[in-house]
Image (tube, rainbow, N blue to C red):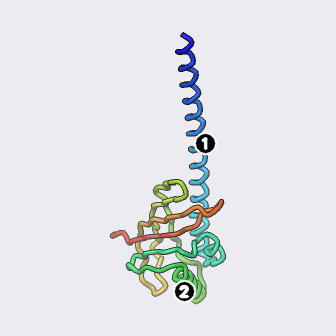
């Protein structure tokens, strides 16, 4: 009987530890997801306002992207794009077209966060050279650096209408 009781209490101890551990993991994952979601929101604002300071803070120097034109570039290419948008918006003397940034799923895997979603432009949205912007599917990949997240890779492609 004593042996059975010992096994029961040891089993309950392991179940309790596993439950507490899982609760802590779930809480950490939720906090990480909230942090990545916030960076995604701020990134949209930064792109619209051509905020290069924000981009230098939250985009890794090793960043790489494949755009819908199948061109691959890094942080320098992103900064050139922001400069081109800024120049275009100043010439237009207007606000940039609205692009709705929809997050479909965020997956956290240790120090990697994967965000999948869609960028849906309004009817007036055009590229810097005047071509209409199409709806795009994207994947953003973040890596945790110390206590914050940095964008390390992005892939986006046009969705046929």
The image's mark for residue 24 is 1
Q: Mark 2 or mark 1, which is nearer to you?
A: 1
Q: Identify the element where label 1 is drawn.
A: helix
> Which quadrant, please, contains the C terminus?
bottom left
Q: State how far apart marks 2 and 1 are (Cα).
A: 45 Å
- At numbered mark 2, what does the secondary structure look like: helix, strand or loop? helix
Side of 113 relative to 147 (left or right): left
Residue 138 left/right relative to 36? left
Q: Say above or below: 15 vs 79.
A: above
Report the residue at 48% width, 75% height from top.
Answer: 64
Residue 20 in percent (x, y) is at: 60, 36
For the residue pair 14 and 45, the one nearer the viewer reads as 14
User: Mark number for residue 75?
Assistant: none
Mark drawn on residue 84: 2
Residue 13 versus residue 84 in the image, above or below: above
Give x and y (percent) for residue 158. 38, 72
Q: Residue at x 58, y 85 (%)?
A: 83
Q: Which is nearer the eye, 72 or 5?
A: 5
Q: Quarter-wise, where is residue 138 in the image?
A: bottom left
Say above or below: 114 vs 65: above
- Percent position of residue 151, x then y: 55, 68
Query: Residue 116 or 13: which is nearer the viewer?
Result: 13
CA neighbours of label 2 inside 10 A, class few (<14), some (14 to 19), many (20+): some
For the point 59% across and 27% down, which residue is it? 13
């Amino acid at each position: 009987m004593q042996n059975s009781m010992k096994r029961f209490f040891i089993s309950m101890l392991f179940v309790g530890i596993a439950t507490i551990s899982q609760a802590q993991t779930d809480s950490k994952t939720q906090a990480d997801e909230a942090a990545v979601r916030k960076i995604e929101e701020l990134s949209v604002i930064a792109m619209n306002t051509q905020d290069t300071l924000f981009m230098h803070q939250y985009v890794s120097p090793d960043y790489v992207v494949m755009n819908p034109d199948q061109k691959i570039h890094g942080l320098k290419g992103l900064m050139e794009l922001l400069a081109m948008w800024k120049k275009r918006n100043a010439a237009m003397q207007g606000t940039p077209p609205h692009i709705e940034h929809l997050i479909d799923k965020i997956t956290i895997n240790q120090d990697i966060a994967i965000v999948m979603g869609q960028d849906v432009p309004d009817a007036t949205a055009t590229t810097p050279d005047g071509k209409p912007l199409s709806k795009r599917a994207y994947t953003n990949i973040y890596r945790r650096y110390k206590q914050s997240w940095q964008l390390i890779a992005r892939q986006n492609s046009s969705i046929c209408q």
